[in-house]
Amino acid sequence: MSAKDVLILAIESSCDETAASVVKNGRTILSNIISSQIALHTLYGGVVPEIASRKHIEKINQVVEEALTEADVTLEDLDAVGVTYGPGLVGALLVGVAEAKAISYAKKLPLIGVHHIEGHVSANYIEHPDLKPPFMCLIVSGGHTHLVIVKDYGEFEILGRTRDDAAGEAFDKVARAIGLGYPGGPKIDKVSKEGNPNAIVFPKAKLEDPYDFSFSGVKSAVLNHINRCKMQGEEICEADIAASFQKAVVDTLVEKAVKAAKEHHMDKLAIAGGVASNSALRQAMKEACEREHIRFYYPSPIFCTDNAAMIGVAAYYEYKKGVRHGWDLNAVPNLKLGER
Ligand code: KG4
Ligand code: ZN
């Protein structure tokens, strides 16, 4: 480690993962510790906010210690502390924000609040040293669906967003309806591999704004299909339903993202967020980008779903810009993209 290296400890606790990471110079991940609560929330079929907050409190110190140990650094080596302060579950966010404030206050380190979605976008920088703004980015997570131009580090122009459900939310709801359980996305991804994506044609929403999304229609169509089959005594093929639903969502995402890239003369397109780990989306986007001579970027699955490494990367670029937060930093559950 040279004296000029910038070491950031990052913390993420916006939903059901307690995570900490040490990131060097914005692009090198020295550690990436994630304590997932998925098994706990599976009992209830989804994330229970109160349980999430309590678990974060139990785990946060241990996760931070592990991140430092694995990176082979101490608090004395750090240059700053970065933390997700929104959007997310307020009680969950507060645990990370309080932890980050305590460490930065005790060690007199700059405190940098990070937007969770900026973190997701920044996950693309980890494994692609050549990737620099500007580029087009499709953000598809459990809570968000955004199509944005990343104009500069942390600078976004929002072209479109979902009008109702987020892409990941639709995956989770459909998975529940066909009895696959929580979390739905990875389960639909897996079972779809045994299904026929052309078995059922589910509708795609037609919206006035070409870059907006709507997934509640396709979700209702799946529910109607299941009810109709049940009423008519027909057997339900879970794999076919999953594969056909996934195709409807993936086709829409690919079509809009590639159209946006072409219309805005962007030769680089990245995907981010939990749904970006979907194998059908990655494959379809790769093929479409190849056809259109657009360079396609995507993070490894571990950096797509919630993690603190991506927050450390985003924090580094905010740090370089001189962004610093005070001790009054608070959790902002509905923080808008681009707000500081
Ligand atoms: O980004 P993320 O970890 O948390 C939020 O910020 O929301 O995204 C979680 C979402 C969940 O809805 C989950 O079902 C979905 O990402 N997801 C997937 C896959 N892996 C996770 N959706 C489709 N296919 C996957 N392989
Ligand atoms: Zn997320």
Image: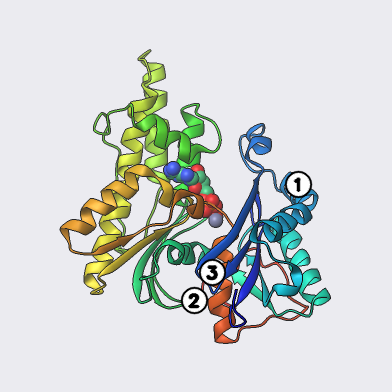
SS label for mark 1 = helix
Q: Residue at x 24, y 33 (%)?
A: 198
SS label for mark 2 = loop
Between circles 2 and 3, the one closer to the viewer is 3
Q: Nearer the viewer, residue 242 or 32?
A: 32
In the rendered image, the residue lying farthest to the top is 233
Q: Position of residue 327 (x, y in %)?
A: 78, 78
Q: Do we see residue 87 in this rendering?
A: yes
For residue 220, above or below residue 235: below
Residue 154: assigned label: 2
SS label for mark 3 = helix
The type of residue carrying mark 3 is: Val
For mark 1, what is the residue? Answer: 55
The type of residue carrying mark 2 is: Gly
Q: Position of residue 147 (x, y in %)?
A: 38, 64
Say whether disc 2 or disc 3 marks the residue closer to the N-terminus. Answer: 2
Between circles 3 and 1, the one closer to the viewer is 3
For mark 3, what is the residue? Answer: 313
Determine the CA span between mark 2 and mark 1.
Answer: 30 Å
In the rendered image, the residue lying farthest to the bottom is 322
